Structures are given as structure tokens and as C-alpha cells.
Amino acid sequence: MELSGPADLAADRVPSEGRRVAAVVFNPVKVDRPALEAVVAAQEAAAGWGTTRWFETSVEDPGQGAVRAALAQGVSMIIVAGGDGTVRAAAEAAAGHEVALALVPSGTGNLLARNLELTLDDVEDAIRSAFGGRDRQIDFGMIEIRRADSHVDRHAYLVMAGLGLDAKMLAHTDEELKAKIGWLAYVKAIVLALRDPEQLRFRYALDGGPAKSIRAHTVIIGNCGSLQGNVALMPDAEVDDGRLDIALLRPEGLRHWVQVVSKILWENGVLRRTRLGRRLKAKDVPALDYLTGERVTLKLHRPEKIELDGDEFGEAVALRTWVVPNGLTIRVPGDAPA
């Protein structure tokens, strides 16, 4: 982790001349620091802010430690430059503190930025919005993951938590191929994951209701519902509605897979984005169930892989997850819709 500023760290903890100070938490693998520094310096000066502090993430610290170090220096805003994993880690550490996060999308997915309809691939616009935009309150999810040895981890997630095909796909993704061709690397991973005939067997309860037993290929619990390519996996999910949306994929054979893909890509992704399409009655697909609630508990028949915001998180035997309404502040452009 790298800190910038005067050598006297005690003095460095106090923003100079009473001006607000920002911090940049960045993934050095995905971010060109000199180029980003030039844009930040120009925008901080134009906005009348003090000198920005800089903190690197690492394999050992994907962002939580960097954010805590920034908070210890009294910063007013944390600019997160990295992929979905960096954003998730930064939000986990920032939650509960009076600090806003600004996003500089720098990964393959950038799913939170996509769901917030932020500009991608434009560093100058992202930094201008950070220093000159407005605050928006959004929800996030908290999850407790129980492992086979009974240990329980607690994490935050901003986009989705997934079990089954979703998590197996990530396990099959070639990171070197992903770095070269981006999201197309997932195509090979999906094919490999689909070859696995095993389904999830589990019991779940929604909002303290009765437990139900079910089999499914995939369980997705989302704070928001859009994937890359404008794919609306959960079209009713909103990032600030105080609810979690759950998708249960239960296809049996090719015909059901075709129905699922058709509903997600055509009905959710095309029809529901038009005025006429929104008036049409949505068709139920037996192989795809949608649920919604504020908290979910789930107990698996055996350990299964789990992912959070596109990163592998090992295997779970049970989980408990809930929404934290308006728990995180994100900087968005001043003209963005509320």
C-alpha cells in the first residue's frame, strides 16, 4: 500500500487549509497511475479540493486495508479505480462511515457502474463527476457464508451473490484469456460449466417464512440485476429499493435452456426496454423463478462454490444474506437521474 503526501504523517492526517481531501484507492494492475494522477490533479484544483492521497491495493489487500488507511486520514471521498472486486472490497470497508465512493470503472465487468448507468471507459468524465457530481444513496447486501468446518465469513456485495452454474463458470475462467479478450473468455467457461450435470439441492427461507426444499442449476441473489451487454437477468431489481431479488434457474434439458435464454435475452433485454414491451404480460418460464425479499437463509445439501460480485469465494454449506437499505453513498454525475 502506498501513501502520498508530506513525510510528516501526523500532519498528513489533517486536510490542509481546511479543504476537503479525496483519496484514490487503485488496482495497479488495471490502472495507469500517471495518467489518472494528471486528471485527478486538474479536477481537484478546479473544484478547490486539497491534495489527493493515493493508496494501492494488492493481492493480499484487495481494498479494505487501503480504504481504512484513507479513512484514518479524514478524507471526504474515496475514488475507487479498479474492477468489481476492488469496488466490492472498498465498499465493505467504507460501509458505516460518512464517506462517498466515486467509481473509475477499470475492469472487465464494471457491473455496479453499469447498473448505475455511469459512463465507462472515460476517466476524465469519471473524475469530473467525482469532484463535481452529487451523492446518491444505494443499498448493498451483507452475507454470512458458513464453511464445511463451521467457520463463518461475513462480506458485503454490491451486485450479486451466486451459487451453482454461475460460480462454476468463474472457476473455469482462464484469467490470462480474460485479460486478452475480456468477457469472451467466459464463453469457454460457460461451456465447461454446462457439462457438469450436478444440480444444487438446498432449503431456503425468505424473510423468516417457512423453509422450502428445491433443486436448481443456479441461484443468484442480487442487489441489482443487469449484466454485461445489457443482459437484464433480474429486470425488476433496483439498486435502491430496499429489497434483494433472487433468480432460480431450473432448466431440465435443451428446451428449458432455450426458454431461459429467450426470456432473459429477448423479453428482459429487449421487450421490457420498450414502451410497448412493458405493456405486454410477462410469460412465466417453468425453468426460471423470481423471488424478492429483504433477507434470505439457505442451507445446501453439500459444499458448493459461491461467488460475490464476480469473484470466487470458496465453498459454502449455508448462507444468510440481507439488504442494507441506503447503506452506501456513491458519487454520480450532477445531471444523473435520482
Image (cartoon, rainbow, N blue to C red):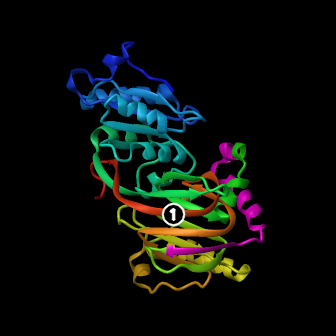
Is 215 magenta? The answer is: no
User: What residue is at 74 percent from the left and 67 percent from the top?
Assistant: 194
Q: How many numbered discs?
A: 1
Q: Quadrant of residue 284?
A: bottom right
Residue to which mark 1 is pinned: 320
Against 283, is 262 above or below?
above
Residue 136's spot in the image, x, y percent?
A: 30, 52
Residue interval drawn in magenta? 178-205
Residue depicted at x 39% and y 43%: 94
Q: Is residue 203 magenta?
A: yes
What x and y, as percent, mark residue 47? 25, 32
* Residue at image coords 72%, 57%: 189
Q: Is residue 326 above or below residue 45?
A: below
User: For this view, does 14 lie left or right of residue 124?
Assistant: left
Q: Mark 1: which amino acid?
A: Arg
Residue 186 lies in quadrant: bottom right
Which of the image's four quarters has the C terminus? bottom left
Q: Residue at x 38, y 30 (%)?
A: 40
In the image, 312 versus 45, the foreground residue is 312
In this view, 176 is above or below 320: above
Q: Residues within 10 Å of mark 1 (few under 14, many from 20)?
A: some
Q: Determine whether the residue tagged by mark 1 lies in a helix, strand or loop.
A: strand
Q: Residue 299's spot in the image, x, y percent?
A: 60, 69
Using the rendered image of the protein, determine whether residue 166 is visible from the camera's viewpoint: yes
| Horizontal and vertical percent position of residue 141 | 45, 58
In this rendering, would 317 be left or right of 42? right
Q: What type of secondary structure mainly makes up the magenta span? A: helix
